[in-house]
Amino acid sequence: MDLLIKNGTIVTATEMYKADIAVKDEKIAAIGTEFNESEFAEVVDADGKLVLPGAIDGHTHLALEFGGTISSDDYFAGTRAAACGGTTTVFDFVNQAHGEKMLDAVKRRDALCSVDAAIDYSFHIGVSDVLSEGMLDSMEEAVEYGIPSFKVFMVYDYGVDDGSFFKVLSKSKEIGALVGVHAENRDVNNFLVEKYLSEGKTEAWWHYMAKNESVEGEADVRAVNLARMAEAPLYIVHLANKMGMEAVTKARTEGYPIFAETCPQYLNFTSEVYKRERGRDFVCSPPIKDQESQDALWNGIANGNVSTIATDHCPFKKSEKDWGITKKDGTPGNFTTIPNGCAGIENMYPYMLSQANEGRLSFSRVVEMCSTNPSKLFGLDHKKGALRVGLDADIVIYDPEKNVTIRNDELHGDTDHTIWEGVELKGYPEATYSRGKLVYKDGEFLGERGKGQLVKCHKLNFKGPQL
Ligand code: URP
Ligand code: ZN
Ligand code: ZN
């Protein structure tokens, strides 16, 4: 046997209990209490610690081309940072080019990722072209290959209209896929942008106002209705507002397979961040909303209507955020010329576990939303998302007594700032194992570039809101 983690408290999505975990050939080989230590190459004492499945971050944008630049964490930097925050699998977004078949898009991106990723990864396919010949049908080839997850954007210039969205939903149901949606009302957003700019309102606050609670909420309601009409499941990514949370809750109460993801930045900050001197650093889409929306999201977590937490990690450097003041070409900028996105890949599990440690939710609920539910929703529960015999030994040892104040200088990505700067956490991951190999310990990255593998996912078929 390769590794024994003994004396820890195992946390699953449903329970916590004291037991030891034996690892052999990258897998969890046994869980019990009566192992013979001499049979193990390495024994780790986790007395007083929690032992958790590695987090699965279902939403990252590594090396993403956006707003005239590329997000500042490539596949190595991003997965290195993920590992140091207890995340052992990331789902990154592949954006389909016009006329590009879905599987070709995946393979194009995988060629970049496979040489760099330090932990395991998979993809969602961002669909932008369903009208060109063969594009819609090409979804099936990707599902057969092991990528059954697609995302449509209702906003941005590459977003789709409701008709195309409906076609993708209908197709997904036939082929065993799940559609995720970035829901914001593009036309209202465009109208408000024009209005504010014509009034000389250029600061980051107006990004929030042009993508306010209703701009997102209306699109959430419409997305839920389209999914119901198509009789297809739907996954709303980065849900950030109260109206949307209410629409998800109502649909789930009525038995529909509608699932919501939210992100730590929406749970810990409010739109007040846009009033800070460098409010532009926090421009992301959807923007961070008001206190009422934050409260609604926490309620959704408490009553089971938020299914997953993910980061939407999409960092840009301060010099690029400054394009909101002066554009790359030297002309005056505004809130529309700031690349959208915030960093967070290393902070998700530490933040959510700290909230549990403070008593706001249970450790099991954190494991459910950050690991077990994403594995089920995206079709990798045959490999990951739980501490169970036969699954990959993706394991985090968490020290509930170690307190950490987040400092960008001590994080492991390539970004030069974080919205999490100065946030105090109660408890912190002490060690991360990726398929049984130690990749992080006590603040230090110990993994290797290129060791991460593409995880192929099985087909999906959700009939109701079981997660
Ligand atoms: O601001 C964000 N989230 N940028 C990344 C693209 C997206 O919409 O998820
Ligand atoms: Zn999005
Ligand atoms: Zn995103």
Image (cartoon, helix red, strand yellow):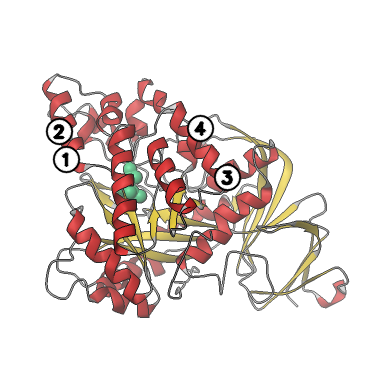
Q: Identify the mark nearer the N-term, 3 or 4.
A: 4
Q: Residue at x 73, y 43 (%)?
A: 400
Q: Hey, what amino acid is under mark 2? A: Phe
Distance of mark 3 from mark 4, alpha carbons? 12 Å
> CB of mark 1 within 8 Å of CB of mark 4?
no
User: To which quarter of the image does residue 67 belong?
Assistant: top left
Residue 286, image x and y in percent?
A: 33, 40
Q: Nearer the viewer, residue 187 or 428?
A: 187
Badge 2: few (under 14), some or many (20 or more) residues near its Cα, within 10 Å? few
Q: In what element is the residue under mark 3?
A: loop
Q: Can you identify the residue that label 2 sits on?
A: 191
Q: CA distance from mark 3 to mark 1?
A: 33 Å
Q: Residue at x 61, y 71 (%)?
A: 392
Q: In the rendered image, which residue does mark 3 sit on?
A: 303
Residue identifier under label 4: 295
Q: Which is closer to the viewer, label 2 or label 3?
A: 3
Residue 146 picture quarter: bottom left
Q: Amino acid at mark 4?
A: Asp
Query: Badge 1: how crowded within 10 Å, few (<14), some, or many (20+)?
Result: few
Q: Report the residue at 34% width, 76% height from top.
A: 175
The Cα–Cα distance between marks 2 and 3, rounded to whole angstroms, is 36 Å
Query: In the rendered view, does 314 fall on the left or right side of 360?
Result: left
